[in-house]
């Protein structure tokens, strides 16, 4: 039984993957494999599963009446900023060299958008007197260069998905004033006193929305799954999904009309042409009716929505011709929400077939413990055996991250 970490940022941790790989317990009855931070298990020494991947090493998770072994399958490494991309690639390559599965994920996290999008758009604090104090510090790219870079990265890495992107209505920064320059960001969850300070969103919501929708469009056009972060902005999210659906619909209509016009120019046999034209239009209309208006698979990581959000969320996604079977949710033990008394009933409402395991950690030191805690939490909520949970969440991860490869090949 294998555990796959569907959402993490180990490339940002102080020692990258080393703490995780070192902390994996050795397989029973086998000599220790890892001896130093840089050492790694040689593929030939690993236990082989399914005749394909070697998975290392086994962990013994005790429950009241049984001892269960799990192995580490791999991880999806989530970018937060374009400056991360090379580190994500390095992390993915390290895992793959050791025969683990690994997925690179590219995108811009809402917490860092203000450092990336065009400087002249991120005017804050109503300060427009020409001084620099109202502009967030950072290397801003004009003309959405970041989006061009993201698209190219995804094209260059057909196995990559889009993540981590999203909307955050609770990530604050100090508003510019006498006491500060507005350059500090802060999460109010960690400090109640923050509520009483003059504050503003680290990136204005309208700009978050725009960048989020742009990234969703790229994911849809390139047929890539997305990993989405949403905090206190579910209404905004539904509006964004609606915008993206409409934008994609218009794009398909433009493409469809263009093809029809080119195909039927012939004035010598008008009635035949008319018939052909109508037939092509009908066919195109039918095709465009079923075309994806949103990314093919959507994963809400560290889900913080209330149970009441789920029906409208799934309905909004189905309107984009994406099946609700392709909508996934994760709950990370590192995020307090995992332990909320309401979480078990939300997990039940979602169901085992649409839950993914995740750590959302940068420091990989406790990642293995968190993965184990993740399956225990789901098993308790759904009243299931931990082995079943491990198997099912692994299958879910394989569907989410790897199933589309056949579609990409067949479309070439
Ligand atoms: Zn994350």
Image: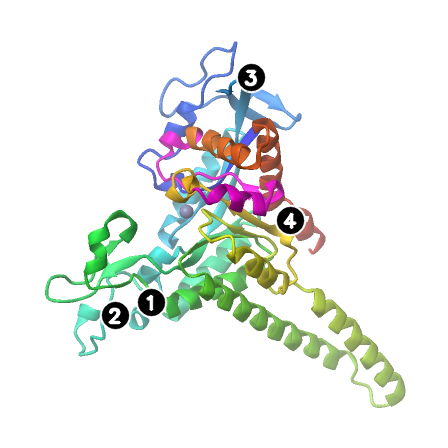
Tag nearer the camera, 3 or 4: 3
Tag nearer the camera, 3 or 1: 3
- State the residue position of label 3: 66
- The disc at residue 391 is none
Q: Name the secondary structure under disc 3.
A: loop
- State the residue position of label 1: 204
Please tell me how crowded label 4 is: few (under 14), some (14-19), or many (20+) other residues with Cα within 10 Å.
Answer: some
Q: Name the secondary structure under disc 1.
A: loop
Residues drawn in magenta: 341-368
Depth check, front residue: 87 or 31: 31
Query: From mark 4 to mark 2, how far is it between C-alphas?
Result: 41 Å
The quarter in which the C terminus is drawn is bottom right
Q: Residue at x 23, y 58 (%)?
A: 195
Q: Residue 214: image x %, image y %?
A: 48, 65
Q: Do the residues labelled 1 and 2 touch (CB within 8 Å)?
A: yes
Q: Residue 283: image x %, image y %?
A: 79, 71
Name the N-terminal-most of marks 4 and 1: 1
- The disc at residue 124 is 2
Tag nearer the camera, 4 or 2: 2
- State the residue position of label 4: 404
Please tell me how crowded label 1 is: few (under 14), some (14-19), or many (20+) other residues with Cα within 10 Å.
Answer: some
């Amino acid at each position: 039984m294998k555990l796959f970490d569907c959402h993490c940022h180990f490339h940002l941790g102080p020692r990258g993957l080393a703490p995780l790989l070192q902390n994996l317990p050795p397989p029973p009855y086998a000599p220790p494999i890892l001896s130093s931070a840089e050492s790694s298990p040689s593929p030939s020494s690993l236990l082989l599963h399914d005749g394909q991947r070697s998975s290392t090493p086994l962990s013994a998770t005790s429950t009241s009446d049984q001892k269960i072994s799990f192995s580490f399958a791999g991880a999806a490494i989530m970018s937060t900023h374009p400056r991360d991309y090379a580190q994500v690639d390095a992390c993915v390559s390290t895992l793959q060299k050791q025969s683990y599965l690994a997925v690179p994920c590219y995108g811009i996290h809402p917490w860092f958008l203000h450092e990336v999008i065009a400087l002249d758009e991120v005017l804050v604090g109503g300060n427009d007197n020409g001084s620099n104090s109202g502009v967030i510090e950072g290397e801003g790219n004009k003309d959405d260069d970041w989006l061009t870079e993201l698209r190219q990265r995804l094209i260059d890495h057909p196995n990559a998905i889009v993540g981590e992107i999203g909307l955050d209505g609770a990530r604050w920064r100090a508003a510019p004033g006498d006491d500060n320059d507005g350059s500090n960001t802060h999460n109010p969850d960690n400090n109640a006193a923050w509520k009483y300070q003059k504050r503003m969103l680290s990136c204005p919501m309208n700009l978050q929305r725009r960048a989020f929708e742009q990234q969703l469009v790229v994911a849809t056009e390139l047929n890539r799954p997305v990993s989405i972060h949403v905090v206190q902005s579910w209404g905004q999210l539904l509006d964004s999904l609606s915008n993206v659906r409409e934008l994609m619909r218009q794009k398909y209509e433009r493409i469809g009309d263009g093809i029809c016009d080119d195909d039927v120019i012939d004035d010598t046999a008008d009635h035949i042409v008319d018939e052909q034209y109508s037939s092509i239009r009908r066919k195109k209309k039918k095709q465009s009716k079923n075309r994806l208006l949103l990314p093919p698979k959507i994963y809400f990581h560290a889900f913080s929505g209330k149970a009441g959000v789920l029906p409208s969320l799934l309905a909004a996604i189905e309107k984009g011709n994406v099946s609700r079977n392709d909508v996934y949710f994760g709950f990370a033990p590192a995020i307090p929400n995992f332990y909320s008394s309401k979480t078990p009933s939300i997990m039940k409402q979602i169901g085992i077939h649409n839950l993914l395991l995740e750590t959302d950690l940068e420091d990989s030191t406790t990642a293995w413990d968190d993965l184990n805690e993740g399956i225990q939490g789901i098993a308790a909520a759904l009243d299931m055996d931990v082995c079943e949970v491990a198997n099912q969440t692994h299958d879910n991860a394989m569907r989410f991250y790897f199933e589309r490869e056949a579609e990409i090949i067949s479309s070439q």
